[in-house]
Amino acid sequence: MSKKVIVIGSGFSSLSAACYLAKSGFEVTVLEKHSTPGGRARVLKKEGFQFDMGPSWYWMPDIFDTFFKDFDKSTEDYFKLHRLDPAYSVHFSDNRQITIGSGLEKIISSFEKYEPGSRHKLEKYMKSSHRNYQIAMSKIVYRPCLTIFDLLTRETILNAKYFIQNIKKSVYRTLKNPDLRLVLQFPSLFLGAMPSRTPSFFNFMNYADFGLGTWYPDGGIGSVVEGMVKLAKSLGVEFKLNASVQQITANYNGEVSGVIVNDSYLKTDIVVSGADYRHTEMLLEKKYRMYSAKYWSKRVFAPSALLFYIGFDRKLDGVTHHALFFDVDFETHIQSIYSNPKWPENPLFYANFPTVTDSSIAPSKKESCVLLVPIATGLESDEKQHQRIFGQIMDRMESRFGLSLRKHILFKEVYSIDDFRRDYSSTEGNAYGLATTLNQIAHRRPKFKSKKLKNLYFTGQLTVPGPGVPPALISGKIVGQYIAKMEEMGS
Protein backbone atom coordinates (compact mmCIF):
# COMPACT_ATOMS: atom_id res chain seq x y z
CA MET A 1 0.00 0.00 0.00
CA SER A 2 1.35 3.46 -0.93
CA LYS A 3 2.39 5.78 1.85
CA LYS A 4 0.25 8.78 2.73
CA VAL A 5 1.67 12.29 2.49
CA ILE A 6 0.03 15.42 3.80
CA VAL A 7 1.19 18.66 2.19
CA ILE A 8 0.44 21.77 4.21
CA GLY A 9 -0.42 24.77 2.05
CA SER A 10 -1.05 25.11 -1.67
CA GLY A 11 1.44 27.71 -2.83
CA PHE A 12 3.76 27.00 -5.73
CA SER A 13 6.26 24.95 -3.73
CA SER A 14 3.50 22.82 -2.16
CA LEU A 15 1.82 22.22 -5.51
CA SER A 16 5.16 21.28 -7.04
CA ALA A 17 5.99 18.86 -4.21
CA ALA A 18 2.51 17.33 -4.37
CA CYS A 19 2.86 16.66 -8.10
CA TYR A 20 6.29 15.00 -7.80
CA LEU A 21 5.18 12.90 -4.83
CA ALA A 22 2.02 11.75 -6.58
CA LYS A 23 4.03 10.85 -9.67
CA SER A 24 6.26 8.69 -7.44
CA GLY A 25 3.24 6.76 -6.20
CA PHE A 26 2.43 8.42 -2.89
CA GLU A 27 -1.12 9.09 -1.74
CA VAL A 28 -1.06 12.87 -1.45
CA THR A 29 -3.49 15.21 0.29
CA VAL A 30 -3.04 19.00 0.19
CA LEU A 31 -4.45 20.99 3.11
CA GLU A 32 -5.17 24.66 2.40
CA LYS A 33 -6.52 27.01 5.08
CA HIS A 34 -8.14 29.36 2.54
CA SER A 35 -11.15 28.74 0.31
CA THR A 36 -9.03 28.79 -2.86
CA PRO A 37 -5.58 27.33 -3.64
CA GLY A 38 -2.47 29.31 -4.48
CA GLY A 39 -1.08 30.57 -1.19
CA ARG A 40 0.48 33.98 -1.79
CA ALA A 41 -0.54 33.59 -5.44
CA ARG A 42 -4.26 33.62 -4.67
CA VAL A 43 -6.61 35.65 -6.84
CA LEU A 44 -8.83 38.49 -5.64
CA LYS A 45 -12.11 38.95 -7.54
CA LYS A 46 -14.29 42.01 -7.10
CA GLU A 47 -16.93 43.73 -9.25
CA GLY A 48 -15.80 41.91 -12.38
CA PHE A 49 -12.11 42.64 -11.76
CA GLN A 50 -9.48 39.96 -11.13
CA PHE A 51 -6.18 40.62 -9.35
CA ASP A 52 -3.12 38.47 -8.74
CA MET A 53 -2.73 39.08 -5.01
CA GLY A 54 0.95 38.19 -4.92
CA PRO A 55 3.41 37.31 -7.72
CA SER A 56 2.78 39.11 -10.99
CA TRP A 57 6.07 38.67 -12.90
CA TYR A 58 6.56 35.57 -15.04
CA TRP A 59 10.33 35.19 -15.34
CA MET A 60 12.56 32.18 -16.04
CA PRO A 61 10.15 30.43 -18.42
CA ASP A 62 12.63 27.57 -18.76
CA ILE A 63 11.95 26.53 -15.16
CA PHE A 64 8.19 26.40 -15.76
CA ASP A 65 8.84 24.45 -18.97
CA THR A 66 11.02 21.95 -17.09
CA PHE A 67 8.36 21.48 -14.42
CA PHE A 68 5.58 20.58 -16.83
CA LYS A 69 7.92 18.53 -19.04
CA ASP A 70 8.68 16.33 -16.00
CA PHE A 71 5.05 15.19 -16.26
CA ASP A 72 5.06 14.86 -20.07
CA LYS A 73 3.11 18.10 -20.32
CA SER A 74 3.85 21.63 -21.50
CA THR A 75 2.78 25.08 -20.38
CA GLU A 76 0.64 25.28 -23.52
CA ASP A 77 -1.51 22.47 -22.12
CA TYR A 78 -2.63 24.78 -19.31
CA PHE A 79 -2.18 28.45 -20.25
CA LYS A 80 -1.12 30.68 -23.12
CA LEU A 81 2.02 32.82 -22.75
CA HIS A 82 2.91 36.17 -24.29
CA ARG A 83 6.36 37.76 -24.22
CA LEU A 84 5.89 41.38 -23.21
CA ASP A 85 7.37 44.12 -25.36
CA PRO A 86 8.05 46.44 -23.70
CA ALA A 87 8.88 44.22 -20.74
CA TYR A 88 8.53 47.11 -18.30
CA SER A 89 9.15 50.82 -17.87
CA VAL A 90 11.24 52.53 -15.21
CA HIS A 91 10.36 56.06 -14.10
CA PHE A 92 12.92 58.41 -12.57
CA SER A 93 12.77 61.97 -11.26
CA ASP A 94 12.42 64.96 -13.63
CA ASN A 95 10.15 62.84 -15.86
CA ARG A 96 13.02 60.70 -17.08
CA GLN A 97 11.93 57.25 -18.22
CA ILE A 98 13.58 54.11 -19.57
CA THR A 99 11.61 51.46 -21.40
CA ILE A 100 13.06 47.95 -21.33
CA GLY A 101 12.27 46.23 -24.60
CA SER A 102 12.20 42.56 -25.50
CA GLY A 103 15.52 41.07 -26.53
CA LEU A 104 19.07 41.52 -25.31
CA GLU A 105 20.40 43.34 -28.38
CA LYS A 106 17.55 45.84 -28.25
CA ILE A 107 18.24 46.52 -24.56
CA ILE A 108 22.01 46.89 -25.02
CA SER A 109 21.43 49.33 -27.88
CA SER A 110 19.07 51.41 -25.76
CA PHE A 111 21.64 51.49 -22.92
CA GLU A 112 24.27 52.68 -25.40
CA LYS A 113 22.05 55.67 -26.24
CA TYR A 114 21.79 56.61 -22.55
CA GLU A 115 25.48 56.02 -21.87
CA PRO A 116 27.64 56.15 -25.00
CA GLY A 117 30.47 53.64 -24.77
CA SER A 118 28.65 51.30 -22.38
CA ARG A 119 28.00 48.58 -24.97
CA HIS A 120 31.26 46.68 -24.55
CA LYS A 121 31.14 46.63 -20.74
CA LEU A 122 27.48 45.68 -20.68
CA GLU A 123 28.03 42.87 -23.17
CA LYS A 124 30.83 41.55 -20.96
CA TYR A 125 28.61 41.83 -17.87
CA MET A 126 25.78 39.98 -19.59
CA LYS A 127 28.15 37.19 -20.67
CA SER A 128 29.03 36.65 -17.00
CA SER A 129 25.34 36.86 -16.14
CA HIS A 130 24.51 34.19 -18.72
CA ARG A 131 27.37 31.96 -17.55
CA ASN A 132 26.29 32.28 -13.92
CA TYR A 133 22.72 31.47 -14.91
CA GLN A 134 23.88 28.27 -16.61
CA ILE A 135 25.98 27.32 -13.56
CA ALA A 136 23.12 28.07 -11.17
CA MET A 137 20.58 26.03 -13.14
CA SER A 138 22.80 23.06 -13.95
CA LYS A 139 25.01 22.84 -10.85
CA ILE A 140 23.33 24.45 -7.83
CA VAL A 141 19.63 25.24 -7.55
CA TYR A 142 18.32 21.70 -8.09
CA ARG A 143 20.60 20.27 -5.39
CA PRO A 144 19.30 19.66 -1.84
CA CYS A 145 22.19 21.71 -0.36
CA LEU A 146 22.17 19.79 2.92
CA THR A 147 25.93 20.42 3.21
CA ILE A 148 28.44 22.85 1.75
CA PHE A 149 29.58 20.18 -0.69
CA ASP A 150 26.41 20.66 -2.75
CA LEU A 151 27.59 24.23 -3.36
CA LEU A 152 31.24 23.39 -3.98
CA THR A 153 31.46 22.33 -7.60
CA ARG A 154 34.28 22.84 -10.07
CA GLU A 155 32.32 25.68 -11.65
CA THR A 156 31.52 27.50 -8.39
CA ILE A 157 35.11 27.17 -7.17
CA LEU A 158 36.45 28.61 -10.44
CA ASN A 159 33.95 31.46 -10.08
CA ALA A 160 34.44 32.02 -6.36
CA LYS A 161 35.05 35.74 -6.87
CA TYR A 162 31.37 36.15 -7.73
CA PHE A 163 30.43 34.98 -4.23
CA ILE A 164 32.85 37.40 -2.57
CA GLN A 165 31.90 40.49 -4.58
CA ASN A 166 28.44 42.06 -4.43
CA ILE A 167 26.05 43.07 -7.17
CA LYS A 168 26.22 46.79 -6.45
CA LYS A 169 29.98 46.94 -6.94
CA SER A 170 29.76 44.86 -10.11
CA VAL A 171 27.12 47.15 -11.54
CA TYR A 172 29.01 50.31 -10.61
CA ARG A 173 32.10 48.99 -12.40
CA THR A 174 30.00 48.33 -15.49
CA LEU A 175 27.94 51.51 -15.83
CA LYS A 176 28.27 55.18 -14.89
CA ASN A 177 24.74 56.43 -15.59
CA PRO A 178 22.83 56.39 -12.24
CA ASP A 179 19.53 55.48 -13.89
CA LEU A 180 21.03 52.53 -15.77
CA ARG A 181 22.75 51.39 -12.60
CA LEU A 182 19.38 51.16 -10.86
CA VAL A 183 17.88 49.22 -13.77
CA LEU A 184 20.72 46.70 -13.59
CA GLN A 185 20.34 46.35 -9.81
CA PHE A 186 16.56 46.02 -9.89
CA PRO A 187 16.34 42.23 -10.56
CA SER A 188 18.30 41.53 -7.38
CA LEU A 189 15.35 42.95 -5.43
CA PHE A 190 13.47 39.75 -6.33
CA LEU A 191 16.02 38.03 -4.10
CA GLY A 192 14.94 40.14 -1.15
CA ALA A 193 18.24 41.76 -0.20
CA MET A 194 20.09 45.00 -0.77
CA PRO A 195 22.29 44.84 -3.91
CA SER A 196 25.24 45.72 -1.67
CA ARG A 197 24.68 42.51 0.31
CA THR A 198 23.76 40.19 -2.57
CA PRO A 199 26.67 38.14 -3.99
CA SER A 200 27.44 39.16 -7.57
CA PHE A 201 26.95 35.53 -8.63
CA PHE A 202 23.27 36.37 -8.52
CA ASN A 203 23.72 38.74 -11.43
CA PHE A 204 22.25 35.75 -13.25
CA MET A 205 18.96 37.52 -12.54
CA ASN A 206 19.97 40.06 -15.18
CA TYR A 207 20.07 37.25 -17.72
CA ALA A 208 16.65 36.11 -16.49
CA ASP A 209 15.48 39.67 -17.15
CA PHE A 210 17.21 40.79 -20.35
CA GLY A 211 17.98 37.39 -21.87
CA LEU A 212 14.92 35.26 -21.12
CA GLY A 213 12.44 38.11 -21.03
CA THR A 214 9.26 39.02 -19.18
CA TRP A 215 6.18 36.96 -20.01
CA TYR A 216 2.49 37.00 -19.18
CA PRO A 217 0.12 34.01 -18.96
CA ASP A 218 -3.44 34.76 -20.07
CA GLY A 219 -5.54 35.26 -16.95
CA GLY A 220 -2.50 36.21 -14.88
CA ILE A 221 -0.38 34.16 -12.50
CA GLY A 222 -3.59 32.67 -11.12
CA SER A 223 -3.90 30.68 -14.35
CA VAL A 224 -0.55 29.03 -13.57
CA VAL A 225 -1.94 27.99 -10.18
CA GLU A 226 -5.05 26.61 -11.89
CA GLY A 227 -2.86 24.65 -14.31
CA MET A 228 -0.78 23.13 -11.52
CA VAL A 229 -3.89 22.21 -9.52
CA LYS A 230 -5.36 20.57 -12.61
CA LEU A 231 -2.14 18.62 -13.15
CA ALA A 232 -2.01 17.59 -9.49
CA LYS A 233 -5.59 16.32 -9.55
CA SER A 234 -4.88 14.34 -12.71
CA LEU A 235 -2.06 12.65 -10.77
CA GLY A 236 -4.46 11.73 -7.96
CA VAL A 237 -3.74 14.53 -5.48
CA GLU A 238 -6.66 15.33 -3.16
CA PHE A 239 -7.30 18.92 -2.09
CA LYS A 240 -9.00 19.91 1.15
CA LEU A 241 -9.81 23.64 1.30
CA ASN A 242 -10.75 25.66 4.39
CA ALA A 243 -8.50 23.19 6.23
CA SER A 244 -6.48 24.93 8.92
CA VAL A 245 -3.73 22.81 10.51
CA GLN A 246 -3.61 23.26 14.28
CA GLN A 247 -0.98 20.73 15.27
CA ILE A 248 1.51 18.23 13.86
CA THR A 249 1.68 15.11 16.02
CA ALA A 250 4.57 12.70 16.51
CA ASN A 251 5.02 9.25 18.02
CA TYR A 252 7.64 7.96 20.44
CA ASN A 253 9.81 6.73 17.58
CA GLY A 254 10.51 10.30 16.50
CA GLU A 255 8.22 10.14 13.50
CA VAL A 256 5.36 12.36 12.40
CA SER A 257 2.11 10.49 12.99
CA GLY A 258 -0.52 12.92 11.77
CA VAL A 259 -2.02 16.39 11.90
CA ILE A 260 -4.94 17.97 13.66
CA VAL A 261 -6.94 20.02 11.18
CA ASN A 262 -10.19 21.80 12.02
CA ASP A 263 -10.24 19.88 15.33
CA SER A 264 -10.09 16.51 13.53
CA TYR A 265 -7.15 14.10 13.43
CA LEU A 266 -5.68 12.94 10.11
CA LYS A 267 -3.16 10.09 10.21
CA THR A 268 -0.27 10.24 7.78
CA ASP A 269 3.14 8.73 7.09
CA ILE A 270 4.89 11.90 5.90
CA VAL A 271 4.28 15.64 6.24
CA VAL A 272 5.62 18.27 3.83
CA SER A 273 4.98 21.85 4.88
CA GLY A 274 4.92 24.69 2.41
CA ALA A 275 3.64 26.99 5.13
CA ASP A 276 5.87 29.48 6.91
CA TYR A 277 8.81 27.52 8.32
CA ARG A 278 8.77 28.98 11.84
CA HIS A 279 4.98 28.71 12.04
CA THR A 280 5.20 25.05 11.03
CA GLU A 281 7.65 24.33 13.83
CA MET A 282 5.32 26.08 16.29
CA LEU A 283 2.78 23.37 15.41
CA LEU A 284 5.17 20.82 16.95
CA GLU A 285 6.03 20.07 20.53
CA LYS A 286 9.00 22.24 21.52
CA LYS A 287 11.40 19.29 21.68
CA TYR A 288 10.86 18.61 17.97
CA ARG A 289 11.71 22.14 16.78
CA MET A 290 15.07 22.67 15.07
CA TYR A 291 15.28 26.45 15.17
CA SER A 292 14.81 28.68 18.21
CA ALA A 293 13.30 32.14 18.50
CA LYS A 294 16.88 33.44 18.84
CA TYR A 295 17.81 31.82 15.54
CA TRP A 296 14.94 33.49 13.71
CA SER A 297 15.66 36.85 15.32
CA LYS A 298 19.11 36.79 13.73
CA ARG A 299 17.88 36.04 10.22
CA VAL A 300 17.74 38.80 7.60
CA PHE A 301 14.28 38.70 6.11
CA ALA A 302 13.26 39.93 2.71
CA PRO A 303 10.80 42.84 2.84
CA SER A 304 7.13 42.80 3.57
CA ALA A 305 4.79 44.75 1.30
CA LEU A 306 1.99 47.27 1.27
CA LEU A 307 -0.36 46.53 -1.63
CA PHE A 308 -3.28 48.36 -3.16
CA TYR A 309 -5.71 46.61 -5.52
CA ILE A 310 -7.55 49.24 -7.56
CA GLY A 311 -10.35 49.17 -10.11
CA PHE A 312 -10.51 52.18 -12.45
CA ASP A 313 -13.66 53.12 -14.37
CA ARG A 314 -11.74 53.87 -17.60
CA LYS A 315 -8.69 52.83 -19.57
CA LEU A 316 -5.55 54.79 -18.69
CA ASP A 317 -3.28 56.33 -21.29
CA GLY A 318 0.49 56.03 -21.08
CA VAL A 319 0.73 53.12 -18.63
CA THR A 320 2.68 49.90 -19.22
CA HIS A 321 1.96 46.40 -17.97
CA HIS A 322 4.82 46.62 -15.44
CA ALA A 323 6.17 49.95 -14.21
CA LEU A 324 8.84 50.72 -11.60
CA PHE A 325 8.88 54.11 -9.92
CA PHE A 326 12.43 54.94 -8.88
CA ASP A 327 11.68 58.68 -8.92
CA VAL A 328 12.78 59.17 -5.31
CA ASP A 329 16.03 58.32 -3.56
CA PHE A 330 16.66 54.57 -3.82
CA GLU A 331 19.11 54.31 -0.92
CA THR A 332 16.86 56.17 1.52
CA HIS A 333 14.00 53.73 0.93
CA ILE A 334 16.30 50.70 1.14
CA GLN A 335 17.65 51.97 4.47
CA SER A 336 14.09 52.22 5.82
CA ILE A 337 13.71 48.49 5.10
CA TYR A 338 17.01 47.08 6.39
CA SER A 339 19.07 49.57 8.40
CA ASN A 340 16.43 51.68 10.16
CA PRO A 341 13.11 49.81 9.86
CA LYS A 342 10.22 52.24 9.57
CA TRP A 343 7.48 53.29 7.20
CA PRO A 344 9.20 54.94 4.20
CA GLU A 345 8.90 58.72 4.05
CA ASN A 346 8.78 58.84 0.25
CA PRO A 347 8.55 55.33 -1.16
CA LEU A 348 9.70 53.58 -4.27
CA PHE A 349 6.87 51.51 -5.70
CA TYR A 350 5.86 49.08 -8.42
CA ALA A 351 2.71 49.49 -10.53
CA ASN A 352 1.09 46.59 -12.37
CA PHE A 353 -1.52 47.26 -15.05
CA PRO A 354 -2.22 43.76 -16.44
CA THR A 355 -5.26 44.96 -18.41
CA VAL A 356 -2.81 46.64 -20.80
CA THR A 357 -2.13 43.09 -22.03
CA ASP A 358 -5.23 41.15 -20.95
CA SER A 359 -8.63 42.83 -21.16
CA SER A 360 -10.40 39.69 -19.92
CA ILE A 361 -9.54 40.35 -16.27
CA ALA A 362 -11.59 43.54 -15.94
CA PRO A 363 -14.96 44.80 -17.20
CA SER A 364 -14.97 46.33 -20.68
CA LYS A 365 -13.12 49.65 -21.02
CA LYS A 366 -11.91 49.55 -17.41
CA GLU A 367 -8.42 49.20 -15.96
CA SER A 368 -7.11 47.10 -13.10
CA CYS A 369 -4.05 48.12 -11.13
CA VAL A 370 -1.92 46.68 -8.34
CA LEU A 371 0.49 48.96 -6.49
CA LEU A 372 3.23 47.47 -4.32
CA VAL A 373 5.47 49.28 -1.85
CA PRO A 374 8.27 47.20 -0.24
CA ILE A 375 8.38 47.84 3.51
CA ALA A 376 10.36 46.59 6.48
CA THR A 377 9.33 43.44 8.30
CA GLY A 378 8.26 43.70 11.93
CA LEU A 379 6.16 46.84 11.45
CA GLU A 380 2.53 47.11 12.50
CA SER A 381 -0.15 47.97 9.95
CA ASP A 382 -1.09 51.62 10.28
CA GLU A 383 -4.08 52.96 8.36
CA LYS A 384 -2.75 56.52 8.54
CA GLN A 385 0.51 55.37 6.96
CA HIS A 386 -1.44 53.47 4.30
CA GLN A 387 -3.43 56.60 3.43
CA ARG A 388 -0.34 58.83 3.43
CA ILE A 389 1.60 56.52 1.14
CA PHE A 390 -1.35 56.01 -1.20
CA GLY A 391 -1.75 59.77 -1.49
CA GLN A 392 1.94 60.18 -2.33
CA ILE A 393 1.73 57.48 -4.98
CA MET A 394 -1.37 59.00 -6.56
CA ASP A 395 0.25 62.43 -6.66
CA ARG A 396 3.31 61.07 -8.44
CA MET A 397 1.36 58.93 -10.90
CA GLU A 398 -1.05 61.76 -11.73
CA SER A 399 1.90 64.08 -12.36
CA ARG A 400 3.73 61.49 -14.45
CA PHE A 401 0.79 60.39 -16.60
CA GLY A 402 -1.07 63.69 -16.71
CA LEU A 403 -4.27 62.03 -15.49
CA SER A 404 -6.73 62.72 -12.68
CA LEU A 405 -6.61 59.17 -11.37
CA ARG A 406 -8.45 59.62 -8.08
CA LYS A 407 -11.80 60.52 -9.59
CA HIS A 408 -11.75 57.35 -11.71
CA ILE A 409 -11.26 54.92 -8.81
CA LEU A 410 -14.19 52.52 -8.45
CA PHE A 411 -12.74 50.76 -5.41
CA LYS A 412 -9.48 50.21 -3.57
CA GLU A 413 -8.52 47.21 -1.42
CA VAL A 414 -5.51 47.43 0.92
CA TYR A 415 -3.29 44.51 1.90
CA SER A 416 -0.47 45.05 4.39
CA ILE A 417 1.92 43.45 6.82
CA ASP A 418 -0.73 42.30 9.31
CA ASP A 419 -2.53 40.54 6.46
CA PHE A 420 0.63 38.56 5.69
CA ARG A 421 0.78 37.57 9.35
CA ARG A 422 -2.88 36.60 9.49
CA ASP A 423 -3.25 34.86 6.13
CA TYR A 424 0.12 33.11 5.93
CA SER A 425 1.35 33.07 9.55
CA SER A 426 4.32 34.87 8.05
CA THR A 427 7.30 35.42 10.36
CA GLU A 428 7.65 39.17 10.99
CA GLY A 429 5.07 39.66 8.24
CA ASN A 430 7.62 38.96 5.49
CA ALA A 431 6.33 38.72 1.94
CA TYR A 432 9.33 37.06 0.24
CA GLY A 433 11.06 34.82 2.77
CA LEU A 434 14.73 35.18 3.70
CA ALA A 435 17.01 37.67 1.99
CA THR A 436 19.59 36.17 -0.36
CA THR A 437 22.79 37.16 1.43
CA LEU A 438 26.07 35.21 1.53
CA ASN A 439 25.18 33.86 4.98
CA GLN A 440 21.74 32.75 3.84
CA ILE A 441 22.29 30.79 0.63
CA ALA A 442 22.42 27.08 -0.14
CA HIS A 443 23.41 25.00 2.93
CA ARG A 444 23.10 28.09 5.17
CA ARG A 445 19.35 28.29 4.72
CA PRO A 446 16.97 26.39 7.02
CA LYS A 447 17.11 22.70 6.09
CA PHE A 448 14.26 21.20 4.11
CA LYS A 449 14.56 17.97 6.13
CA SER A 450 13.85 17.94 9.85
CA LYS A 451 16.67 16.65 12.06
CA LYS A 452 14.24 15.96 14.89
CA LEU A 453 11.49 14.05 13.08
CA LYS A 454 12.35 11.47 10.46
CA ASN A 455 9.44 12.11 8.12
CA LEU A 456 8.89 15.88 8.33
CA TYR A 457 9.97 18.08 5.45
CA PHE A 458 9.77 21.74 4.47
CA THR A 459 9.46 23.46 1.13
CA GLY A 460 9.16 27.05 -0.04
CA GLN A 461 10.87 30.41 0.15
CA LEU A 462 12.44 30.00 3.60
CA THR A 463 14.43 26.94 2.55
CA VAL A 464 16.39 26.07 -0.60
CA PRO A 465 16.85 27.41 -3.16
CA GLY A 466 15.23 30.72 -2.09
CA PRO A 467 12.50 33.30 -2.77
CA GLY A 468 10.49 33.68 -5.96
CA VAL A 469 8.07 31.58 -7.99
CA PRO A 470 10.64 29.65 -10.11
CA PRO A 471 12.68 28.75 -6.99
CA ALA A 472 9.44 27.60 -5.35
CA LEU A 473 8.84 25.14 -8.20
CA ILE A 474 12.39 23.90 -7.77
CA SER A 475 12.00 23.64 -3.99
CA GLY A 476 8.99 21.36 -4.41
CA LYS A 477 10.89 19.21 -6.87
CA ILE A 478 13.90 18.88 -4.54
CA VAL A 479 11.71 17.75 -1.64
CA GLY A 480 9.44 15.49 -3.66
CA GLN A 481 12.27 13.66 -5.37
CA TYR A 482 14.34 13.42 -2.19
CA ILE A 483 11.47 11.77 -0.30
CA ALA A 484 10.90 9.33 -3.15
CA LYS A 485 14.60 8.46 -3.19
CA MET A 486 14.72 7.94 0.59
CA GLU A 487 11.63 5.74 0.56
CA GLU A 488 13.05 3.69 -2.31
CA MET A 489 16.25 3.19 -0.30
CA GLY A 490 14.23 2.26 2.77
CA SER A 491 15.67 5.12 4.84
Image (cartoon, grey):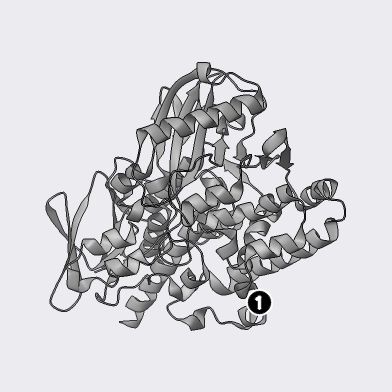
**Is residue 10 among what the camera can see?**
no
Q: Is residue 286 above or below residue 181?
A: below
Q: Residues within 10 Å of mark 1 (few under 14, many from 20)?
A: few
Q: Quadrant of residue 250?
A: bottom left
Q: Which residue is mark 1?
A: 161
Residue 401 placement, left or right of 231:
right
Out of 94 and 147, give the one closest to the viewer. Answer: 94
Q: Amino acid at mark 1?
A: Lys
Residue at x-position 42% and y-position 50%: 431
Above or below, 224 against 156 in this view is: above
Asked whether, in this view, residue 338 is left or right of residue 105, the answer is left
- Answer whether residue 488 is visible to the viewer in this image: yes
User: Where, quadrant-wise, is the N terminus in this rendering?
Assistant: bottom left
The quarter in which the C terminus is drawn is bottom left
Q: Nearer the viewer, residue 401 or 146?
A: 401
x 75%, y 64%: residue: 173
Q: How many marks?
A: 1
Where residue 223 appears, x then y in whole percent?
Answer: 48, 41
Say which residue appears at 38% left-offset and 72% top-offset.
Answer: 447
Of all residues shown, which one is farthest toward the right?
117
Circle 1 — which element? helix
Image quadrant in which you'd find residue 126:
bottom right
Residue 352 locus on image (x, y percent) = 56, 36
From the viewer's side, name the closer residue of 464 and 183: 183
Whole-percent x and y of residue 391? 49, 28
Residue 143 x/y as whole percent: 49, 73
Q: Quadrant of residue 123?
A: bottom right
Relative to 121, is 181 on the left or the right? left
